Image: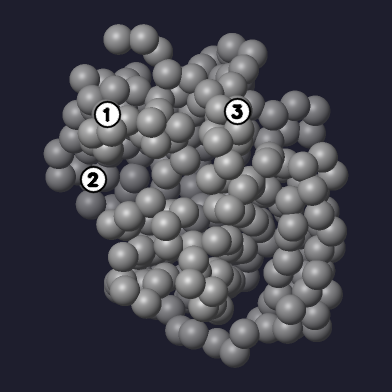
Amino acid sequence: MFSPYYAWDRSRNPFAHCSVNVVLYGDRSNAFCMTERGERSLSRDARTIQIGPSGLEWDGTSLTIRLDEVTAPIPSRVRGTVRVHPPGITQAPQTLDARGRHRWWPMAPASPVEVNLTEPGVSWSGTAYFDTNHGDEPLEDGFSRWTWCRADLKPGAAILYDVVRRDGSTQDLTLRFDADGSAREIEPPSPAGLPKTGFWRMPRSTRSDDGRAEVVRTFEDTPFYARSLLASTLCGKAVKPVHESLSLDRFMNPLVRLMLPFRMPRPLG
């Protein structure tokens, strides 16, 4: 979605701009992989997709992700497997714009996951979130900005998705998912302000039952995107949602796009 190489490619062939994005957040350091690859590195069928040395395979009940990537800007290896076991799949995508050009499908909002990495040597199990986005035009043509967050409710999950469209209209989604993937819209919680990020001053906001939320940790502070861990209350429960803020107005700045290859290299050939 945010590939500068795709934006500069007049052919706009999406298959020529593929990557597997892997991010690890640790107590002492983080690891970020997002190497973009060309069409010759891509193969796919109904159950598998291979992008360079990494791939995903669906066997009908579980998704296995095999990773073999290199971090940027300082190179190091990330290798291993992630296995997601969805207890149920949600029924249909959500439309984010009035013309139906942008769809978001939270396919498995709360699924058991097993992570086993040989490099770095870490493993754990917990709860995973799996979704897809697809559209018929660039995101920046449809939206000015959005915020998104997901909270684990054990069982199930809650997701808030608030968008500001390019025409100025808005959509505020508040969805609660049961463990089997069944979903229902609930009354939107109250707006809750958050501080801007420390370096790039990215605006952040969310919603909660009592209109209060705090930032526990900022994972990503970039010119147009922020990812954070929050503490708030949703559906009557104290939760720690993962939160994202995206400014597509900032993303459209040519200087911002020139910065992206620093984190998103593309091999020659």
Q: Residue furthest left?
A: 45
12 relative to 36, above or below? below
Residue occupied by mark 1? 16
The residue drawn where x is 38% and y is 31% is 8
| Residue 80 visible in image | no
Structural crowding at the residue carrying mark 2, measured as other residues with C-alpha within 10 Å and reported as few (<14), some (14–19) or many (≥20)? few
Q: Distance of mark 2 from mark 1, alpha carbons?
A: 26 Å
- Counting residues from the N terminus, which is met first, the one under dot 3 or under dot 2? 2
For the N terminus, which image quadrant? top left
Residue occupied by mark 2? 59
The numbered disc on residue 229 is none
256 relative to 214, above or below? above
Q: Secondary structure at mark 2?
A: loop
| Residue 186 percent location from the top left of the image | 55, 87
| Residue 96 percent location from the top left of the image | 42, 70
User: 100 or 123: nearer the eye?
Assistant: 100
Image-based side of 255 in relation to 228, left or right: left
| Residue 162 visible in image | yes
**Which is closer to the viewer, label 3 or label 2?**
3
Q: Residue 89's quadrant in the figure? A: bottom left
User: 70 or 3: nearer the eye?
Assistant: 3
Q: Residue 211's quadrant in the figure? A: bottom right
For the C terminus, which image quadrant? top left
85 relative to 221, above or below? below
Q: Secondary structure at mark 1?
A: helix
The residue drawn where x is 71% and y is 75% is 207
Image-based side of 23 in relation to 134, left or right: right
The residue drawn where x is 23% and y is 25% is 39
Instruction: Tell me the amino acid under the disc marked 2.
Output: Asp
Instruction: Tell me the amino acid under the disc marked 1.
Output: Ala
